[in-house]
Image (cartoon, rainbow, N blue to C red):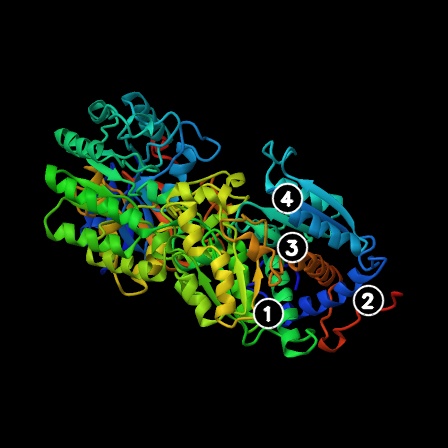
Amino acid sequence: MKHLLSTQDLSRKDALDILDTAEEMAQVGQREVKKLPALRGRTVVNLFFEDSTRTRISFEAAAKRLSADVINFSAKGSSVSKGESLKDTAQTLAAIGADAVVIRHWASGAPQRLANTDWIDARILNAGDGTHEHPTQALLDAFTMRRHWAKLAGTGSAGTDLSGMRVAIAGDVLHSRVARSNVWLLRTLGATVTLVAPPTLLPVGVDAWPCEVSYDLDATLEQGVDAMMMLRVQKERMNASFFPSAREYSRRWGFDDARLEALDRHGLKDTIIMHPGPMNRGLEISSAAADSARSTILDQVSNGVSVRMAALYLLLTGGRDDETSTSHAATEGIPA
Amino acid sequence: MTQNHLITSASLLGGAPQDILIAEGVVVALGADAAAHPAAADATVLDATGLVALPGLVDVHTHLREPGREDAETVETGTRAAALGGYTAVHAMANSSPVADTAGVVEQVHSLGQAAGWVDVRPVGAVTIGLAGERLAELGAMAESRAQVRMFSDDGICVHDPVLMRRALEYVKAFDGVIAQHAQEPRLTEGAQMNEGDVSAVLGLAGWPAVAEESIIARDVLLAQHVDSRLHVCHVSTAGSVEIIRWAKQRGIKVTAEVTPHHLLLTDELVRSYDPVYKVNPPLRTQEDVLALRQALAEGVIDVIGTDHAPHPSEHKECEWAQAAMGMTGLETALSVIQHTMVETGLMGWADVARVMSEAPAGIGRLEDQGRPIAVGEPANIVLVDPAARWKVDGAAMATKGRNTPFQGMELPGRVTATFFHGHPTVLDGALNTPRHGAGA
Ligand SMILES: [Zn+2]
């Protein structure tokens, strides 16, 4: 694994490698001193062409816990907004000696451009590109689901996958990089995925995806769901006629209090409720659902740091090519 | 006195080898008569054994970028590329800066073409002032100008207002003009980045749906029928468009259609690389569309090849997909791509190639001395092709300023070895020779 650009081209082995390493990293997060020397002397650049404080601080925390030097490069108010090209920016970062570039970009495919061109030789981590992919978000979602699924099975989560798990993802799939990354990754890990959305917010071509599609959230819940992931819906979609009104959207596709109760009615006592954040409370998810015991929303945030530590570690150290050497590589020799 | 040329043993349109004698810009003798003709005495002899002779190619759709974007291409560089590709005439699209929407601008482009001397440059006039889609440009003045414009197009932008399109179609009947439509419904393609389908769904790039092309073509053929005028559809890219044009032709509507070489070979699968060299408008479609377009060209539903040669400076392609300019170069690869996709697949013979790349395009543009048969008394616009040659496409080695060839690194068949433009060899031995005005004068 040279770069982490998408989950579509992520093998099952690499995905499990990241998740298992993330479990080890999570142990570090429990300690009083949350720091490892693994990336000492390495430079990680957070290159953000789009504001996302949440994702940036998550990557920043991950890199710092691995002792990397972190440079935050926000394209807003910089030479980039004055017309400097991605190519020039990349060459500048190469000259600075960046070992890894974490890139968030409004344009789909921008991370792949960095990886495929000779502009820069660093490891590229996609931190969300346009409406394409957001692989570390899907990995942290899968990490969260796997812990839950393993716990129900009464096992540890290392080495396990999501076989048999039923995941529903509801919301603006058309514009969602989170949905895309999740569909590919969850499928790779053995889960069955159902996308629930108004037909206007599903891409033409979705029928070729390895998942089910539903226009009816209630029917999907009735069939049984182990993890219910709600996607953020932007109110401005309403003005582009994707749906008639926020009220109608939330009535038909929002996870409201009635649907929260429906989980109990259907006997789905172990179903978790997920959201990648930031939430529109009252639109795609009610406060009662977001704050319920079923909600994993804050776990997702903390798991995000572990998963990003794992991704940075594996990309920058070459990781664990040998399947038998999977455990302890990261934490070996570090006093607890 | 221009130099006479005796081309020996050329396969005329792929037929039996014959000699062709050219003098004073005209074919003066063919076959056994050629060597015996008095003009053969001091002729330069060119052995064309194994080569196919076609009438000089005519492009209905070229972006020469001058005036205004001389960093992308000039009339000089673009027409050098054309000559190397086997062309003897090109239609220069109107989306220059200033827009070719007045007699003054079309005459300027026309004279730049004459000064360059590599091919006939026939300016296309804009349909609307500034390509703004609001008011008709002075179509009559452009038609009467020295440039004798017959084809009008807002190419790059669709004439989407149905009333304006109707008026334009009606108005150009006064001087036997044709409206060449870039069929793209604007509202359905706002922010569009690539073909809408399975690949766009995965890549998260905004879709350019086939229906946005097909709905405009359907409307336009009905308008053309209603006012009994000539419509030309630029760069047809979908299987659905083919069906609408087939239907229109069956009803006797005066519609002609063009397809680009890239739409006959490449598909939207290439966009998975996010390499903007594959970004073009209309976008690359699916394999099913490619096969339907080939079939339509072979059957004559699609009349002509138009290159839509669209050079861009490299900085407009070395960027994010969404930031990149749309367009590909095509003049120097067109004939090879047609050989590859149409001839070597058995769909067409060389006579068909002559029809779709020379005769029919000249007819649409009303170019009287282009697209003519290779026959005694006809203007000597002739290209010699080596169909057995294979070459590897290298954008850096091309005459066009544009480095944005989507065929980079591909091995293609067929090589233009010579181009005669009104009897003057603009290309010899596969390399540029001299422009026509400098010839022996
Ligand atoms: Zn066009």
Q: In the image, are marks 3 and 4 on the same chain? A: yes
Residue B100 place in picture, x, y as percent:
32, 27
Q: Secondary structure at mark 2?
A: loop
Q: Which image quarter is the C terminus of chain A in?
A: bottom right
Task: Read off the residue under disc 2.
Answer: A331
Q: Amino acid at mark 1?
A: Ser
In 3D space, how far apart are the residues under numbered discs 3 and 2 (Cα atoms)?
A: 22 Å
Label placed on residue B185: none
Residue in front for this viewpoint, B130 or B164:
B164
Q: Secondary structure at mark 1?
A: loop
Q: Is residue B154 visible?
A: yes
In 3D space, how far apart are the residues under numbered discs 1 and 2 (Cα atoms)?
A: 24 Å
Look at the picture and state if A320 lies above or below B163.
Answer: below
Task: Read off the residue under disc 1.
Answer: A11
In 3D space, how far apart are the residues under numbered discs 2 and 4 (Cα atoms)?
A: 30 Å
* A303 lies left or right of B144: right
Residue B308 place in picture, x, y as percent:
35, 43
In 3D space, how far apart are the residues under numbered discs 4 and 1 (Cα atoms)?
A: 27 Å
- Decide: few, some or many residues near mark 1? Use Cα within 10 Å; few <14, some 14-19, many ≥20: some
User: Which residue is located at x 56 percent, y 66 percent?
Assistant: A185
Q: Earlier in the sequence, mark 1 or mark 2?
A: 1
In 3D space, how far apart are the residues under numbered discs 1 and 3 (Cα atoms)?
A: 16 Å
Q: Is residue B433 visible?
A: no
Q: Secondary structure at mark 3?
A: strand
Q: Amino acid at mark 4?
A: Phe
* Chain assignment, label 2: A
- When asked about the image quadrant of residue B167, the answer is top left
Label placed on residue A125: 3
Task: Read off the residue under disc 4.
Answer: A48
Q: Amino acid at mark 3?
A: Leu
